[in-house]
Structure formats: C-alpha cells, structure tokens
Image (cartoon, coloured by chain):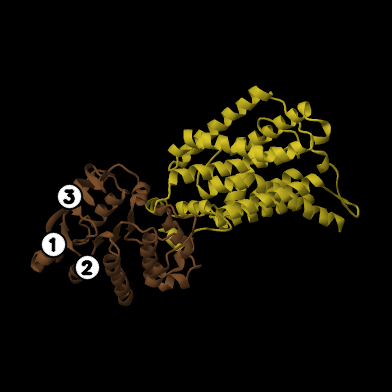
C-alpha cells in the first residue's frame, strides 16, 4: 500500500518537474514554433541566478533572513532569463522565424556559447545550492515521508501553469498572442503590432525556463551542462502533448512522469527510461501530432 | 483621401497589376469591378500593405504610406474585410471583435459599439462560440463587424457577398448602404454585380488584365461599356 502511494507521489513529482521545465518551451516551441535549443541554457541561467543570490545572501544578509533568498530568486531568475530571451530574440531568432532548421542550428550554437560562459564565470565543477530550511525534511504520512522540496516544486509548477493560462486566456496581451499565432497577417491588418507580440511572448517563455532552473537547484547540484540533461525531456513533453496546446504539455508531462516511475519501479532506472522512449515512439506513430492536436479545418488551409 | 499613383504590384517575378491611377475622395464609395483573376484582390492587398508595390505610391490622408506596415495603416484608419474572411478560428466571436478594436487603441475599455450588434444580431447570440465554428455567412458578418468596431475612416471590402445565401447578402448590402449614409466612411468595394454597384457607389472602376480599362461616375456610366469587360 505505502509502496503504491510512494510510486504515485514520485510519478506526480517527476511529472511536475517535467511540466515546469517544459512550460517555457510549450510557449516558445508550442505556440511560436521556434526550435530553441538554447532553452536548456536558459534553465541553467535560472539555476545560476539562484546560486548567485544564495551566495550574496550568505555573505551580506543576517542568518535569520537567509531562507528568503529562495523566494527572491524565483522572480529574479524569471526576469534575467527573460532578459536573455529578449536578447536572443532581437539578435537572432527574429531573422529565423520561417527557417526552423537554421534556428535549430543557430540556437544550438548559442547554447554552447552560454555553457562556456557559465564555465568561465563559475568554473566547470558543479556547485551546490543550500536549500532554504523550510524545505528541508518532509511530510510524514504513516511510514511515508514526502519531501517538502518535492511538494514545493509540485505547487510551483501548478502556480506557473495557472499564471500562463490566465495570461493567455484572460488578458488583452494574451488575446493578441493567440490572434497572431492563428493568423499573423490578419492580426497585423487589424492593427496588432506583431513584432512586439513575438518579442514579449518569447521573453515570457524564456522567463519560465528561468523559474524551472531555480526549482532544479532544490534537486541537486548544478553545473554548466545542466540544461542539456533537461532539454530532450522538455521537447518530448511538448511533442507528446501536441504542439500548440498548453493542455497537451500538462498531460504529456504527467503521463511521461507516471510511466517513467512505474516502469522504474518494476525494472531499473535505465530500462525504465528505455521503455518510456519506446512507448513515446509507438505513440507518435499512432498520433503524429501529439495528444491534443490544435489543428482544425480552418487552420489546415 | 486615398490616392494611388502609378501603382505596380506583383508576386515575385510576375506583375499582376500595373499603372494603376485611382482616387477616393472623402466619404466616397468606389466600386472596383472586373472578372476573376484580373488583380482586384492584389490591388486591395497592396493598399492594406500585405503586398509591397514594385513601384508607384500610395497616399492616405496626405501621408505617403507606401512602405508602412499593415498595422500602421490599420491604426491610421483603414479597415479591411478580406476575401477569405480570415476569422481567428480559435478565438470566440467576442474576442475576434476585441482584436478589431486594436486599431483604435481602445482595447482597455473592451467596449463593442451596440450598433454593431444591431447590424448583426447573430454575433451577440453567438458571442462565446469559436469563430471557426460559424458558417461562412456568419463569418462574413463577423469579418465586417470586426473591421467596423474601430470606427475606420476608410473601408476595404473584398467581395463581401461572395458565396453567401441571398438573405444575408441583402443584410450585408443594407449595412454597407447604412454606413455610407450615416457615417462619413470612405470605401473601396470589390463587387461583381453591376446593379448593386450602381445602387451604392459614387464612382466605378473596371479592371482588366491588371489595369484600369474604364472609369466613370455612377451618374454617367454606360452599362454596355462595363459589360464589355465583365462578360466571359
């Protein structure tokens, strides 16, 4: 019994981590169709921002307030990653909107450059971030201990998801974004400034990568190549979920999370991962456009 | 109000319309007629800024807008109802109308003029449906309403009654006539039906092979001259 609950919780937890790292990509790749291979490095930037803020707090802020660093790093990681996103969009991606293969290669190069930048500044070895004390320990249910950090990431990813939904479906800016993604030319003819919409949307997607990086510091040490571990998973979530649909990313993330945990439970970590990949390959044969397909008759024309 | 000077537009290497001289005065309705494929839609797309002309110039309200973006022109007061209606399929009817407000910069109030719903009551009834779920005729009404909500001073209507059931055609024609009478909106209307064109327009241009072959005010128009270019 407790084993089942633990497996369920682990699946939920893994799903929420996947969701958090894929949310930003669901915006830039899912909605805007930009293949941004540097997305993993934006996650890395978020993680290092958390590390820097933590170090500053260790040095300059009195001990009792140390825990506040983490709450502060979430918005700052968002802003700095979004800033890098803006830089990337203005200097590179806007020239490549209609050339997905070129943008794949170019952003891959940018990713390598950012990795090297991190290596030059922070050194090649991984660095550890000390978790805030309120996230140490766990919730005890019977014989089970559910770590607070995992519960925190779960809540954070749900919070981010709600924020993105509200932004896209309840605000004027979100409505503009949806209009531009559905019919760019007509939106332009009605007075929507499509350049600004592109820039802001890309910045938001990048910002959420920053938040994901911030959350990853709770799970283990971080290094310059942390992004490359997660970028494949992130793309997988978006592709399985269905490009262009945020709901798809949610289903994709938790689906992959659960299957991964269940397979791992019965086999080993490696075989579990292999089985998940095989399942995804089979699934994409059956539904090439993902779980939630945003295509309609009008969009196909 | 709008002046096209020696306009030449095409796609890639091929030139579709050439040597266009056209003038629309304040609160004047101008009809463009012609067979399919002579360049009427191309001409409208160039005025809206979707296609950039190879040569010539477009003057709107004494401003040379030849090289300006479509959104600049929309904000300047040009409303556009394209041939394919181009409704945002996954936005609700109401959201489609709100996007129409972008050009007037008045999106903060989120207010749609009531008289829009008087013209097209169906849009109020279907407020929360997805634009893509409407029928062709309803989409056409939505496309016209979407262009009207920002109070444009100039309207481009590309065959607004094409492929639509007769009673909605009558509705749309009544709305166009109403706008002409009530507001000072200037219009370019692409139309195939000469009788209707004569009933609503002040001036008519007939296009063939990408050039204007005949033009006349409605008072002095000779039907046989028009039919020469319209018959197949």
Residue at the image point whose x is 38% and y is 59% from the top: B86
Q: Residues within 10 Å of mark 1 (few under 14, many from 20)?
A: some
Residue at numbered disc 2:
B200
Subunit ID for the residue under disc 1: B
Whole-percent x and y of residue A150?
77, 47
Is residue B121 or residue B13 the one in the foreground?
B121
Please say if the residues under marks 2 and 1 sit with CB atoms less than 8 Å apart: no
Residues flagged by tags 1 and 3 on a common chain: yes
Q: Residues within 10 Å of mark 2 (few under 14, many from 20)?
A: many
Residues flagged by tags 3 and 2 on a common chain: yes
Please say if the residues under marks 1 and 3 sit with CB atoms less than 8 Å apart: no
In the picture provided, is A44 more to the left or to the right than B75? Answer: right
Residue at numbered disc 1:
B217
Residue A103 versus residue B114 in the image, above or below: above
Whole-percent x and y of residue B56?
20, 43
- The answer, for residue A275, to whether it is visible in the render is no
Residue at numbered disc 3:
B20
Is residue B211 or residue A142 the one in the foreground?
B211
Residue at the image point whose x is 80% and y is 35% from the top: A65
Whole-percent x and y of residue A249?
61, 52
Residue at the image point whose x is 82% and y is 56% from the top: A5
Whole-percent x and y of residue B139?
39, 66
Circle 2 sits in a helix, a strand or a loop, which is it?
Answer: helix
Which quarter of the figure is the C terminus of chain B placed in? Answer: bottom left
- The answer, for residue A299, to whether it is visible in the render is yes
Subunit ID for the residue under disc 3: B
Looking at marks 3 and 2 on the same chain, the residue that comes earlier in the sequence is marked by 3
Looking at marks 2 and 1 on the same chain, the residue that comes earlier in the sequence is marked by 2
Q: Which chain is brown?
A: B
- The colour applied to the residues of chain A in this rendering is yellow
Q: Residue furthest bottom?
A: B167
């Amino acid at each position: 019994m407790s084993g089942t609950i633990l497996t369920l919780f682990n699946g939920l937890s893994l799903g929420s981590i996947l969701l958090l790292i894929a949310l930003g990509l669901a915006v830039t790749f899912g909605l805007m169709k930009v293949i941004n291979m540097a997305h993993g490095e934006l996650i890395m930037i978020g993680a290092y921002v958390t590390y820097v803020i933590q170090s500053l707090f260790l040095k300059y802020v009195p001990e009792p307030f140390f825990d506040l660093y983490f709450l502060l790093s979430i918005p700052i990681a968002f802003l700095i990653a979004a800033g890098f996103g803006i830089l990337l969009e203005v200097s590179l991606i806007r020239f490549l909107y209609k050339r997905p293969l070129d943008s794949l290669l170019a952003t891959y190069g940018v990713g390598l450059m950012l990795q090297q930048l991190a290596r030059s500044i922070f050194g090649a070895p991984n660095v550890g971030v000390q978790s805030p004390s309120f996230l140490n320990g766990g919730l005890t249910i019977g014989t089970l201990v559910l770590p607070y950090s995992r519960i925190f990431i779960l809540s954070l990813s749900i919070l981010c998801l709600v924020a993105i939904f509200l932004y896209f479906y309840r605000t004027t800016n979100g409505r503009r974004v949806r209009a531009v993604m559905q019919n760019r030319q007509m939106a332009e003819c009605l007075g929507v400034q499509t350049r600004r919409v592109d820039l802001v949307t890309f910045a938001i997607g990048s910002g959420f990568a920053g938040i994901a990086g911030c959350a990853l510091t709770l799970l283990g040490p971080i290094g310059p190549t942390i992004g490359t571990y997660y970028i494949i998973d992130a793309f997988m979530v978006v592709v399985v979920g269905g490009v262009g649909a945020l709901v798809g990313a949610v289903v994709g993330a938790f689906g992959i999370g659960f299957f991964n945990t269940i397979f791992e439970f019965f086999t080993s970590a490696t075989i579990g991962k292999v089985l998940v990949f095989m399942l995804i390959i089979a699934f994409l044969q059956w539904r090439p456009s993902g779980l939630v397909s945003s295509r309609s008759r009008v969009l196909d024309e | 109000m709008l002046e096209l000077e020696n306009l030449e537009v095409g796609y890639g290497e091929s030139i579709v319309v050439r040597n266009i001289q056209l003038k629309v005065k304040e609160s004047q309705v101008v009809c463009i007629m012609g067979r399919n494929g002579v360049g009427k839609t191309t001409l409208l797309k160039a005025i809206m800024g979707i296609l950039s002309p190879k040569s010539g110039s477009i003057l709107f309200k004494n401003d040379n807008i030849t090289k300006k973006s479509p959104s600049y022109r929309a904000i300047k007061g040009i409303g556009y109802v394209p041939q394919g209606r181009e409704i945002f399929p996954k936005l609700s009817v109401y959201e489609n109308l709100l996007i129409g407000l972008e050009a007037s910069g008045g999106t903060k109030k989120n207010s749609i003029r009531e008289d829009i719903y008087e013209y097209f009551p169906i849009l109020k009834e279907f407020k929360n449906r997805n634009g893509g779920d409407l029928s062709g005729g309803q989409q056409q009404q939505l496309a016209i309403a979407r262009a009207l909500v920002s109070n444009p001073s100039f309207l481009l209507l590309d065959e607004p009654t094409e492929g639509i059931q007769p009673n909605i055609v009558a509705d749309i024609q009544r709305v166009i006539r109403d706008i002409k009478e009530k507001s000072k909106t200037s219009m370019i209307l692409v139309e195939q039906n000469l009788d209707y064109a004569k009933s609503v327009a002040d001036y008519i241009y007939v296009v063939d092979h990408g050039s204007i072959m005949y033009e006349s005010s409605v008072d002095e128009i000779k039907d046989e001259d028009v039919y020469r270019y319209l018959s197949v």
